Image (cartoon, coloured by chain):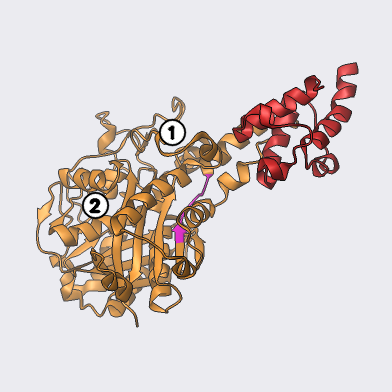
Chain colours: A orange, B red
Amino acid sequence: MRRVAITGLGAVSALGIGVPALWDGLIAGRSGVGLITRFDTTHYLARVAAEVPGFAFESYFDSTELELLDPFAQFAIVAAREATAQAGLELADHERDRAGITFGSGMGGVTTQDDRYKRFYADLPTTRVHPFSIPRMMNNAAASQLSMRFGLRGPALAMATACAASSHAIGEAAEMIRAGRADVMLAGGADAPIAPGVVRCWEAMRVLAPVPKDGNASRACRPFSRDRLGMVLAEGAAVVVLESWERATGRGAAILAELAGYGATADAAHITQPGIDAPARAIAIALEQARLDPAEIDYVNAHGTGTRLNDPTETAIVKRAFGERAKSLAISATKAAHGHAMGASAALELIATVLAIRNGVVPPTINYTEPDPECDLDYVPNQARQMPVRAAISNSFAFGGLNAVLAVKKV
Amino acid sequence: MADDLEQKVIALIARKKKLDPASITVASTFQELGVDSLDAADLLFTFEDEFKIVVPDEAAQSMKSVGEVVDALRQLVKPAEAS
C-alpha cells in the first residue's frame, strides 16, 4: 500500500485569506464570527455568520472569469493557488493523466442559485435567468474549475456529503493514491452559503446561534461550553495537495505530514441527529489504516459545531473510540473561530491539524466559559497549548449520519 | 454599409468578447471570433435583453456568424418596431 504525503496547504476562511491568516488567527484565539453583512437581516433570528473578510474578488479574477464563478468556486481557486504554490507543484504533460481532484461542497453555487431564484420568482413568468447560472451553480463547478486551471486530467469527483464533504474528498483522494489510480491529487472543499434564502432554511432548523445576550456576535459559537448557543454558518475554502510518497520524496518536496488513515461510515439512522457507534467506528478504521494505537494520538480536531446535540454526542464518540485514552487527549473545536464552513470545514480543520503537528502547538477552543457535565474532556479552552503532537485525527460528522475521519502522522 | 442593427450586434459581440469592433464584420463567423457554445448562449441572452425579444431555439441554432445573427434578429425585431 502506497503512503500519502501532504505537500501543500491553501485556505480562505473567516480568519482571512491564506493559511498564515487561518493559523495565526486560531493560535491567537481570534474569532472570525460576526454579524451578517451580506444582506439585511432585520427580520431574521439568525444574524450571525463567519464571512470571509476583505475578499477582493476583482484582484484574483478578471471580469470574464467572474461571470462564470460563484463565490464558492472563487474561494476554491484562491485556496488551490496557495496550496499548489506551497507544494511547488509542476506537472509534466504525461503526469496530468494521473493527477486528479476530489472536491467537497455542501451546497455548491447556492449564492448564485439564491440570487437567480429570487429575481425569477419576483417577476413570474417572464423573467429569464442568465445562461451562466448552471455553470456557476452546479455542485461540481469548483472541481471542474480546478481541473481546468491546474490541468488535472485524472480522476475528478465532487463530494456532496454536507459537513463532511471535504473530509470525504481528502480521504478518497488518499485512497486513489494508495490504490495506484493517481500520483497527485488536489483535495478539499468550499462553500459560500451566506445568502438570504439559505440562512432562512438553516434558521428554521433551530441550530444556528443567535446574537448572544451581551451583543457580542464574535462569541456566538461556543463548542463544548455549557452555555453554547448553536452553530455559526461560515464561508470559505481549503485545499491540500496530496502526493504518493515516492513522488514527493523523489522530487525533494517538503512533506508537511503523512495522511495516514481515513475512516468513513454511516449511521443509517436519522437525517439530522448524530449517532455514536458509526462515528466511533470511523475513528477506529482511520487509526487501523494508519497503524496507530489510540495511545499514539495526541490531538483530536473535533467536529465541534457548538450545537446542543453535537458536542455531548462527540464527547461520547471520542470516549467510545479511545477508551481511557480519551481523558489524555487534547481536543479542540476550531469552528468557534472560523465558523462552520460546510463543505470547506473538514479541509480547514485538517490544515489546523497538520499545522498543530508541525508547529507543536494545539489551537484552542475559544469562547469556552463553563464546563458541561456531558462534555467532560480536555477541550484546550481559550489558550493555544504548546505540546508535541505525534499524530492526530480530524472528525467530521455530516447531517444525514455520514461520518469521515482523517488520521495524520508527523514526519 | 452597416445599418443600426448590424452596428449594435457588432458592438455587443465586441464588448462580450473584448474585441475591437473594427475587427468584426457581418462575414465574421463565431469560430473566427472565438465564440464557443457557452459564449453563444450568453450573447443570445444579451440580444434578448437589448432588443426586448425572445429568440426561439430554432433561430438560436441558425446563428453561426454575425450575418446570421443580424438576419435572424431582423426577423424578430421587425414586428416589435412596427407596433
- Quarter assignment of residue A267: bottom left
Left or right, A373 with reference to A347: left
Chain letter behind tag 2 = A
Residue under label 2, please give it.
Answer: A224
- Residue A58: mark: 1
Say which residue appears at 15% left-offset and 69% top-offset.
Answer: A390
Asked whether A27 or A85 is in front, the reply is: A85
Q: Is residue A106 magenta?
A: yes
Label 1: few (<14), some (14–19) or many (≥20) C-alpha neighbours in 10 Å? few
Q: What quarter of the picture does the N terminus of chain A occupy?
A: bottom left
Nearest to the observer: residue B33 or residue A192: B33
Mark 2 nearby-residue class (10 Å; few <14, some 14–19, many ≥20):
many
In the rendered image, the vertical position of residue A187 relative to residue A123, given as above or below: below
Q: Between label 1 and label 2, give the one nearer the viewer.
A: 1
Q: Quadrant of residue A277?
A: bottom left
| Residue in the picture at 33% in, 76% down | A285
Dominant secondary-structure state across the stretch colored magenta: loop
Specify the segment rendered in magenta. A102-109
x and y percent of residue A159 in the render?
Answer: 48, 60
Would residue A239 be counted in the magenta stretch? Answer: no
Q: Residue furthest bottom?
A: A1
Label at residue A315: none
